[in-house]
Amino acid sequence: MIRNFVKTIRQLTSKGGIEGYFAIKYAEFAKNTEEMRREYKRLAEKVATCIEKGRLLEIGSGPGYVAIELSKLRSFEITGLDISEAMIEIAKRNAKDADAEVEFRLGDAANMPFEDNTFDFIVSSGSLHHWKDLVRVFNEMHRTLKTKGKVLICDVRRDASKEELNKIAEKVDSLIMRWGLRHSIKESYIKEEIVDLIAKTKFKKCKITETPIDLEIWLEK
C-alpha cells in the first residue's frame, strides 16, 4: 500500500502532473478492460463499413486505441488529435508497440491544425462532453471535411437511467474510473440539446440515435 501511495505521489508531481496521472490511469484502464477493448474494436469496425479508403481523423484520440484498431482494418491515412500532451505521448507509444501507422497530433478541436477539406471521415468517442465550445468544434469539423465527408461522434448521455449507469459502473473495478464515468455523465448532453447546437452550425445533414447510455451523432458535409 505504501509503495502504491509513493508511486501515485511521484506521478502527480511529475512533469505531466495531474493531467499526466489521469492520462496514465485511463490508458491502463482502457488497455486492461475487456469491454473497453471490445468497444474500441466495434467502433472501428462501424467506421470501416462507411468508408473504404481515405484520410481519417479521430478527435480526442486519448491513448490511441480506436485509431490503432482502424489501422488494422484498411489502408487508411489516420491522424489522432488530442489536447493532452500526456495522452499524445501514450498514444505514440501504443501505436509503436502495435506497429500501427497512425500520426498523433497535439491540438485543440476548436482550432484544428489542418487545412480545409482534408479528411474523408472524422470520428470521436467519449470526447464531446469535454468540448467548451461545441458549435465552434462542429464548424471546425465542417471546415476540415471534404465534400460528402462524414462524422461519427459517440458520447454518453446525461439522461441515461440510474439502472443503466449502475450496470456500467458495476463492471468498472477502479474507483477513479467510476468517478470519471459519473462525472462524464453529469457533464454530457441530451439529444435535444445536440439538435439545437447543430442547428447553429454549418452542418445541414444530421442524424442522432440513442442507446441506453450513449448518443451517436452522424453528420455529413
Image (cartoon, rainbow, N blue to C red):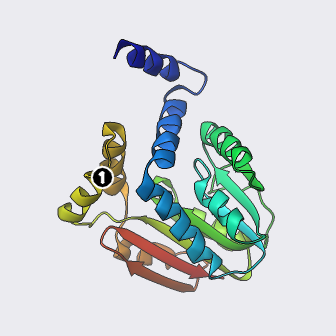
Residue at 69 percent across and 64 percent down: it is 72
Residue flagged by tag 1: what amino acid is it? Lys
Element class at badge 1: loop
Is residue 60 something that shows in the picture?
Answer: no
Is 75 located above or below residue 204 in the figure?
above
Give the vertical position of 101 relative to 74 (above or below): above
Q: Nearer the viewer, residue 221 or 150?
A: 150
Residue drawn at point x = 63 percent, y = 62 percent? 69
x then y, percent, for residue 32: 47, 45
How many numbered badges does the structure rendering display? 1
Whole-percent x, y for residue 6 in the image: 43, 14
Give left or right: position of 169 versus 123.
Answer: left
Q: For this view, does 67 lie left or right of residue 128?
A: right
Dot 1, how many residues are within 10 Å of its Cα: few (below 14), some (14-19), or many (20+)? few
Which residue is painted at 55% across and 65% down in the image? 41
- Give the quadrant of the C terminus: bottom right
Q: Which residue is rendered at x = 22% and y = 56% of the image? A: 166
Q: Position of residue 173 (x, y in %)?
A: 31, 43
Q: Nearer the viewer, residue 205 or 62?
A: 62
Which quadrant of the structure image shows residue 220? Answer: bottom right
Give coordinates of residue 3: x percent, y percent: 41, 14
Circle 1 residue:
171
Quadrant in the rendering for residue 15: top right
Q: Is residue 193 above or below residue 101?
A: below
Q: Nearer the viewer, residue 188 or 155?
A: 155
